[in-house]
Image: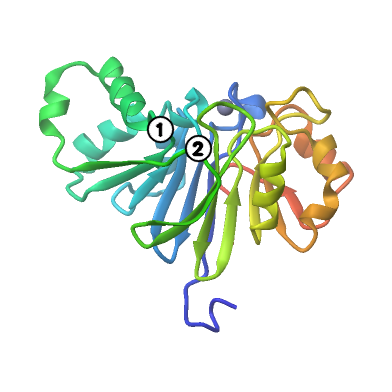
Amino acid sequence: MNEAKGMKQAKIHFLGTGDAWHTGGRFHQALLLRLDAGVVLVDAGSTVCLALDRDGIGTAELDRIFITHLHGDHIAGWPFLLLRMVYRDERVRPLKISGPPGTRETFESLARLCYSDSSLWEKIAFEIIYEELPVEERSGIDCGGLLVDTFPLAHHPTSLGLVFDSGGTRIGVSGDTGWCPALERLVEASDTLIIECTTVERAGAKHLSLEEIRAHAGLFEGKRTYLVHLGAGVAEDLSREPLEGMEAASDGLVTDA
Ligand SMILES: [Zn+2]
């Protein structure tokens, strides 16, 4: 549909699809979206630089980083990414970082804690522009030409589910969450979904299980859904008993949105 409109097909590149302790050897959460409005990194887990080099991606093309919530397996790669942009890639172009309230303070203190020596801070030759988004349900937020919907989800006080609009294709990213009504609205608002699935059976209110996703399979009908944040046995269980339109993503997978 997008090509008929003369727009580029959005692409999803899964840099890391693992849970917090790298079950199955998967990398921490990070997702590269190539959208009409630019190249967006969603989350920057500790292994983000490793994944970028594995897949031959430079940081120069990154326009913006979005953060789904302020947990280490989604943000701990920032100090290394910053170091790489300063010393190796010699970035001069501004970088926008969007996330929940507290993103700026967390990113600055994380990087300063890791690298307190002053030479790094003097060498940063690009502007870092923070944009903090309220943890509220809002639609059509204009982030420099990129339209985004936000959904407060059930995981952490900063958890923001995101739906990105790229030429009419809507890509929903849950970040970490338990099952909740706002997640259902995020699913309904999206054409393509990147949803967390940490366990096979329900294991609490802060993460999703394949059991809950199977129970709500009707909600995902007609959509393409990729599961990430994969804990033990999830990918195997889904391949034994597939759900139409749904797959467990793997590190390095690149797909059209
Ligand atoms: Zn989390």
Mark 2, other Cα within 10 Å: few <14 / some 14–19 / many ≥20: some
* Depth check, front residue: 107 or 200: 107
Q: Looking at numbered disc 1 in the image, what kind of residue is underneath it?
A: Pro
**Toward which corner of the image does residue 88 lie, by quadrant?**
top left
Mark 1, other Cα within 10 Å: few <14 / some 14–19 / many ≥20: some
Q: Earlier in the sequence, mark 1 or mark 2?
A: 1
Q: Looking at numbered disc 2 in the image, what kind of residue is underneath it?
A: Val
Quadrant of the image where one finds ligand 1: top right
Q: Position of residue 179 (x, y in %)?
A: 73, 36
**Toward which corner of the image does residue 208 lie, by quadrant?**
top right
* Quadrant (top left, top right, bottom left, bottom right) of the C terminus: bottom right
Q: What residue sits 36% from the left and 24% below the top?
A: 106
Q: Which mark is residue 165?
A: none
Seen in the picture, residue 20 relative to 222 is either above or below; the reply is: above
Q: Is residue 242 visible?
A: yes
Seen in the picture, residue 255 relative to 47 is either above or below; the reply is: below
* Quadrant (top left, top right, bottom left, bottom right) of the N terminus: bottom right
Q: Which mark is residue 135?
A: 2
